[in-house]
Amino acid sequence: MTILAFDLGGTAVKFGVLTTAGEILEKGKFKTPDTLEEMMQSLVDVKTNYDYTFQGAAFSCPGAVNNETGIIGGASAIPYIHNFPFKQLLEEKLGLPVTMENDANCAALAEVWIGAAKDKQDIIFMILGTGVGGAVIRGGKVHHGANLHGGEFGYMLMDRDGHTLSELGTVVNAATRIAGRLEVPKASIDGLRAFELRAEGNKIAKEELDTMFYYLARSIFNLQYALDPELVVIGGGVSERADFIQELTEYVAKVKASVPIATISPTVVGCQFGNDANLIGATAFHLA
């Protein structure tokens, strides 16, 4: 038996056929449709084009996903999937049992199931992009929270001026600040270029990347002592840099050293899965 998994994104919908061990047998993607009707037809077409016996369909979705009610709250780049019984519609159209989970939570579940946090029960999963998202895993399961906002680390306030972790703790926003201070077009400096500028000796790039690493490390230290996870797993494109996790770990050690009574050192690792994480995690959630 196999699982048909979908990862609903703002620009593309990824899909795959997975075994109950998390192996991806086939995968593909299509452009995210403009309407709900087109989305339903595209999903049905994917199922129809495969000659498998599916145990069920597993969905990774943006927003405040409630698998029990079948409703996705909040907002996302796919507005038509929100605030109505979406899960029930999927089951009706696909003729399969359906589960759905938040996309960041799916990425975390993939790592816990067969990835960087395999066999761990308590982890923090942080996704670094334009902002900081993620998930909290407690006892091997997603901690959704009372308002389905567990893992929204980017909202954390980091200074007295009201700056959030999403503003101060990402390479994307560090690059934006560098461009502003250098008085060059914002589009001319991305995360990769920010690190290149620092390597070239640019003082502003060094200052802004120092700021980013410091506040990200500070948040990890705080989360370690608030939730006491076994691992902190870092995802997002920047985590693929060979030196990023090592440098972040060094900054975490500096933050810890500033607190003499602190005895626990957070263990920070990079994620194992990239673009396939949500498909794998959605499958893990379906099988749980």
Image (tube, rainbow, N blue to C red):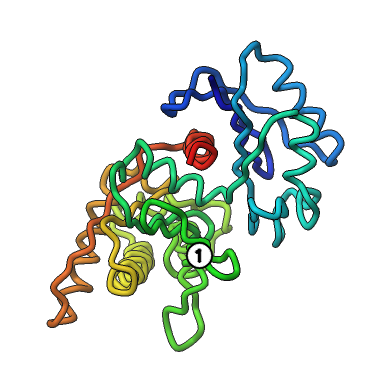
Where residue 87 sits: x, y (%)? 72, 44
- Label 1 sits on a secondary structure element that is loop
Amino acid type at mark 1: Gly
* Residue at x 58%, y 51% (from the top left corner): 102
Which residue was labeled with disc 1? Answer: 150
Q: Residue furthest bottom?
A: 160
Where residue 264 sits: x, y (%)? 17, 69
- Tell me the quarter of the picture where residue 184 sits: bottom right
Q: Nearer the viewer, residue 282 or 128?
A: 282
Q: Is residue 265 shown left or right of residue 62?
A: left
Q: Residue furthest top?
A: 51
Where residue 179 sits: x, y (%)? 50, 62
* Residue at x 50%, y 54% (from the top left corner): 129
Q: Nearer the viewer, residue 199 or 140?
A: 140
- Tell me the quarter of the picture where residue 89 sits: top right
In the image, residue 27 above or below residue 208 = above
Q: How many marks?
A: 1
Q: Is residue 285 shown left or right of residue 248?
A: right
Where residue 52 sits: x, y (%)? 61, 14
In the image, residue 25 above or below residue 228 = above
In the image, residue 154 above or below residue 113 = below
Q: Nearer the viewer, residue 35 or 65?
A: 65
**Is residue 34 visible to the viewer in this orientation of the structure?**
yes
* Residue at x 58%, y 52% (from the top left corner): 187
* Residue at x 76%, y 54% (from the top left corner): 82
Q: Is residue 127 shown left or right of residue 202?
A: right
In the image, residue 170 above or below residue 141 = below
